[in-house]
Amino acid sequence: MDRKKIYITREVPLMQVDLLRQHFDVEINPMDRTLTKEELIEKVKGKDALITQLANKIDKEVLDNADNLKVISNFAVGYNNIDIEEATKRGIQVTNTPGVLSDTTAELAWALMFAVTRRVAEGDGYVRNNKWNSFDPNLLLGQDVTGKTLGVIGAGRIGKAFAKKSLGFDMKILYHNRNRDEEFEKEYGAIYVDKETLLKEADFISLHVPLTDETKHSIGRDEFKMMKNTAIIINTSRGPVIDEKALVEALKEGQIWGAGLDVFENEPKIEEELRSMNNVVMTPHVGSASNETRTKMARLVVDNVLAVLNGNRAITPVNQI
């Protein structure tokens, strides 16, 4: 009996592929880069399962060549890289990795927030470049965090984990979400407000929404104009949620104080002017990048594939098959 075939689009650190190799033929992209569309189309042929990254665009053209595909296990919570409607039409199960990375991503959002607020990257460069000569009471003045107003846009798992960590800093929590969450309000003292109120009142604004037609460029020129000129925006969700050109403009004109970004509109490309801005701290989409979390993600990805190929229900399904 022929063994089922699995293709992994890019080697994942700590991937537990031995579990798959016990029962299936597994092939991994050996190159340290994202596959081209042409390469992906070729590799998906005859495969029963595909383990993908966010950089892999699984659209109709790719799926038209997936003649035997049963499951796409996405190594991420988000799945905007996959045409869910087309996959569902073909009876292909799509899965993701929710829950296991909430705290880790929230921690990075806080790291970015502190880095921007207290000008950590600037200070590090100042010391490394031998510019520090003596104590200066006016050197690299930042902002306080304690007692300020935190605005959370998107109160899902990650947004709530992010808000929870603010309690130790005596912050007022404002949140905006598609649906009001009274349990969240009761547990953390969060206050539900409309988006405009949040943008006007928050000192720190952190984005935790999925990328949809509704959320794309939901933070743009008009939104930046509503914010305080001392506001700091943090994005660890999806890059296109922010209009990057409008962000550059807002930073240049002093409409906001700074930004912490782990995601970008056209990754890995970014608006070039961001590179030279001292009030911007950037990381290369590493929100879930801890050893513990990536191990959990890898296990969930593998377990989803095992479940589907063995005829069982997916553990974390995105679509209904």
Image (spheres, rainbow, N blue to C red):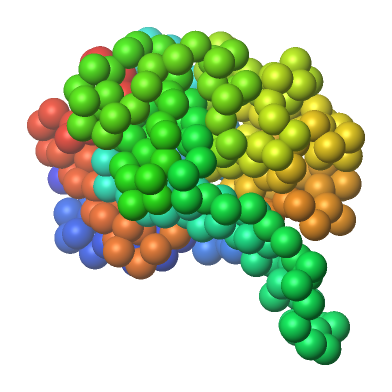
Quadrant assignment for the C terminus: top left
- Where on the picture, by quarter, is residue 49? top left
Q: Residue at x 88, y 39 (%)?
A: 252
Percent coordinates x, y for residue 146 in the rendering: 47, 50
- The foreground one among 183 and 144 is 144
In the depicted structure, whether residue 252 falls above or below residue 185: below
Q: Is residue 91 left or right of residue 249?
A: left
Q: Is residue 58 left or right of residue 93?
A: right
- The foreground one among 234 and 306 is 234
Q: Residue at x 51, y 57 (%)?
A: 111
Q: Residue at x 32, y 13 (%)?
A: 180
- The foreground one among 318 and 50 is 318
- Where on the picture, by quarter, is residue 295? bottom left
Q: Is residue 313 left or right of residue 280?
A: left
- Where on the picture, by quarter, is residue 281? bottom right
Percent coordinates x, y for residue 244 in the rendering: 76, 33
In the depicted structure, whether residue 32 falls above or below residue 47: below
- The foreground one among 266 and 171 is 171
Q: Residue at x 49, y 20 (%)?
A: 83
Q: Is residue 235 visible?
A: no
Percent coordinates x, y for residue 21 in the rendering: 24, 60
